[in-house]
Image (tube, rainbow, N blue to C red):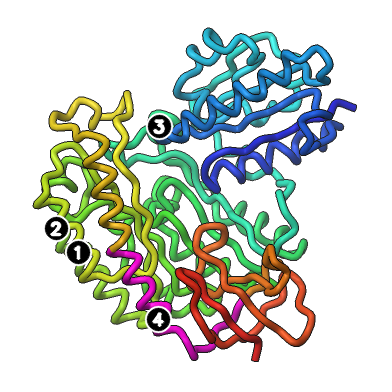
Amino acid sequence: MTKVLINSLGCPKNLVDSEIIAKTLTDFGYILTSNIDEAEIALINTCSFIEPAVKEAIDVILETSKKKNDKNSSLKKIVVTGCLVERYKEQIITSMPEVDICVGIDGYNDIAQILKSADEKVILGPKTDTSFMNKSRLLSDNLSSTYVKISEGCDNHCTYCTIPSIRGKFRSRTIEDILIEVNDLCKNGIKEITLVAQDTTAYGKDIYGKPSLYLLLQNLNKVDNLKWIRMLYCYPELITDELIQTIKSCEKVLHYIDMPLQHSSDKILKLMARHDSKEDYTKLINKLRIEIPDIVLRSTFIVGFPQETENDFDDLCDFLAQTKFDRVGFFEYFKEDGTAAYKISGHLPKKTKTRRRIIAEKIQQDIVIKKNKDRIGKIYSIIIQGVSEDGLFYTGRSYAEAYEIDPLIYVSSKEKLTPKDIVDCKIVAIDKDSLIAEVI
């Protein structure tokens, strides 16, 4: 039987695709391996959202190519899939002759046959199919948490973003199909799901006539054995009153929202083609905290966007200091060919972008340390994920820590714990941006 190594790069949405590919291949008799020295086929599922992701993907392909060129290697075929293919298919084939096949996202349904024999070196499609997302997955680990992809593509066309051209128009899965997947996951030990999409809050607008994330959550809240439901990538303009009330009333929906705001300066938001203003953001944040007092808010911001002045950046810093998000990720703007922002005048030097990112991160770090100190003495339900590297603690997360994204909580316990346990713990100390807790 042919042995295949799958190397999944990029975001959680890509990981879900890789897990579906893995299940498809094993169903067709392929054997998966994590050892490149054993693999006969290497499948690299790539990201190309921003420049560092492109560089990482190219580095992995080149490193894998070295193994293929080794005459003693068992590696005979390199297959590249994912976003890099959709964006740079011609360049991959012409500049990397070691790559045998490039497969776009519409080729995933036929991936097993493609690996066996493909007539073409580049296999793409119109990026309209959703059936692939409904296939079974082979989870990449045996933990209690996983991602569930509820849609594909995006219609927002933010000026800095390549996703609409890479992934196509926004298209949702049905509530029924998602429920089938989640029920199957929970039967196999999953206790927490994190809903992901390019634009999670737009879910259902294409098939139900209006954004319907609240309806999906209400249905998921009824799934047996499912304990926690979390959401990432929620665009702020579609966080409606219906959605807020659903989060508030459904006991399995965690009081945690990730909403990428990207900036606070109205001038920069307009250049980014974002739909809301700083005032809109402020009203939404205040409403969320009034309606759901223990809500944990996560966001992402881009620093160094073209024409961002010191005043614009000061606006962002003031916004961070006033808003006091629980979690924030910062990105330096990257000039991406094919985006509208690529042609905007006033691009900033790298050193300016880096300096601003460091300043913003320091502001947020101080906020996080203060918030962590405020959590000492409080009790949280914590889902156990594993054991720390030094073997002294269990590791886990409360509702306030997203799977694979936020810092872990280090848990001490007199009784033996196992992954998937959910235990009540008291926060007893902090260590930088991490918390230490004891089982009570």
Q: Which residue is mark 2?
A: 315
Quarter that holds the N terminus: top right
Asked which secondary structure carries label 3, the reply is helix
Q: Which residue is mark 4?
A: 294
Determine if the magenta segment contains residue 182: no
Quarter that holds the C terminus: bottom right
Asked which secondary structure carries label 4, the reply is loop
Q: Residue shown at 32%/68% (left/top)?
A: 325
CA distance separating discs 4 and 1: 20 Å
Q: Which residue is mark 3?
A: 51
Front residue (pair 354, 284): 354
Task: Report the mark closest to the observer, 4 or 1.
Answer: 1
Q: Are marks 2 and 4 in contact (CB under 8 Å)?
A: no
Q: Circle 4: is it few (<14), some (14-19), or many (20+) Cα within 10 Å?
A: few
What's the magenta region?
Answer: 363-382
Q: Main secondary structure of the magenta part?
A: helix
Q: Is residue 322 left or right of residue 14?
A: left
Q: Are marks 4 and 3 in contact (CB under 8 Å)?
A: no
Q: Amino acid at mark 1?
A: Phe
Task: Report the mark closest to the observer, 4 or 3.
Answer: 3
Q: How many marks?
A: 4
Q: Are marks 2 and 1 in contact (CB under 8 Å)?
A: yes
In this rendering, does residue 184 appear at all? yes
Q: Residue shown at 44%/60% (left/top)?
A: 213
Q: Is residue 246 left or right of residue 440?
A: left
